[in-house]
Amino acid sequence: MTQVLHWALEYRALSLVLIGLVLAGLSLLMSARTPHELRQAQVVLRWFLLCSIGVGFLWVGAQLWVPQAAASPLRFQLGLAALGFAVVGFASAWGGLGMRLAALIGPSVWIIGGLLGKSAGLDSPFGLSDALVPLVGFALLAWQFGAQRHRSVFARSRL
């Protein structure tokens, strides 16, 4: 059990993506509403944003902010920025397509920048598994966009 917990903390992004997908599946199974493609895409993206962006960046913010907040003003500022991304991730879960896009762009750029910095030998809170967050996030966003585009105006009004 402790090895599973150690693995989940080591591969935080992968664990949160899987938890988000499981919660989305449970939410769709427990819902009394008729499942159609747009609803499925919205629910899966909502849980992804809550878990991967919201909880993930809350964790990154705590990593950066708590241990050495007084020692380094830069880490303090980066921790607050990560907490800001977490708040946007939580808020965008119930927002529209534009807000969800905005909630993916900022963290994705930061993750890719952190991975590039790590490859250059700099300290970064991100690992290689964190590259999964932008890939899955933009794939889910494209799914929601495609499903939303194919729905008629009348059908969209009944969501």
Image (cartoon, helix red, strand yellow):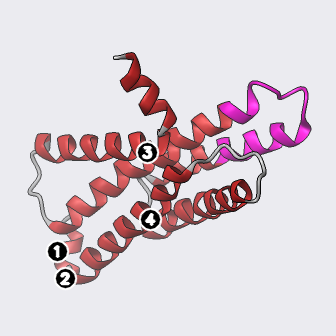
Q: Quadrant of the C terminus?
A: bottom left
Question: Which one is earlier in the sequence, the residue at label 1 or at label 4?
Answer: 4
Task: Give the class, few, some or many, for how many residues have Cα within 10 Å of label 1's Cα (few <14, many ≥20).
Answer: few
Q: Which residue is mark 1?
A: 155
Viewer-nearest of labels 1 and 3? 3
Residue drawn 82% across and 43% down? 77
50 with respect to 75 (left or right)? left
Please, what is the three-letter code of the amino acid marked with disc 3?
A: Leu
> What's the CA distance linking mark 4 and mark 3?
16 Å
Question: Which one is earlier in the sequence, the residue at label 3 or at label 2?
Answer: 3
Task: Give the class, few, some or many, for how many residues have Cα within 10 Å of label 4's Cα (few <14, many ≥20).
Answer: few
Residue at disc 4, secondary structure: helix
> What's the CA distance linking mark 1 and mark 3?
26 Å
What is the number of the mark on residue 50? Answer: 3
Q: Tags 1 and 3 in contact by the CB under 8 Å rule?
A: no
> What's the CA distance linking mark 1 and mark 4?
29 Å
Chief SS of the magenta region = helix
Please, what is the three-letter code of the amino acid marked with disc 2?
A: Ser
Up-down relation of residue 113 to residue 64 (above or below): below
113 with respect to 104 (left or right)? right
Q: Which residues are magenta?
A: 63-84
In this orientation, does residue 58 appear? Answer: yes
What is the number of the mark on residue 152? Answer: 2
Q: Is residue 81 magenta?
A: yes
Viewer-nearest of labels 4 and 2? 4
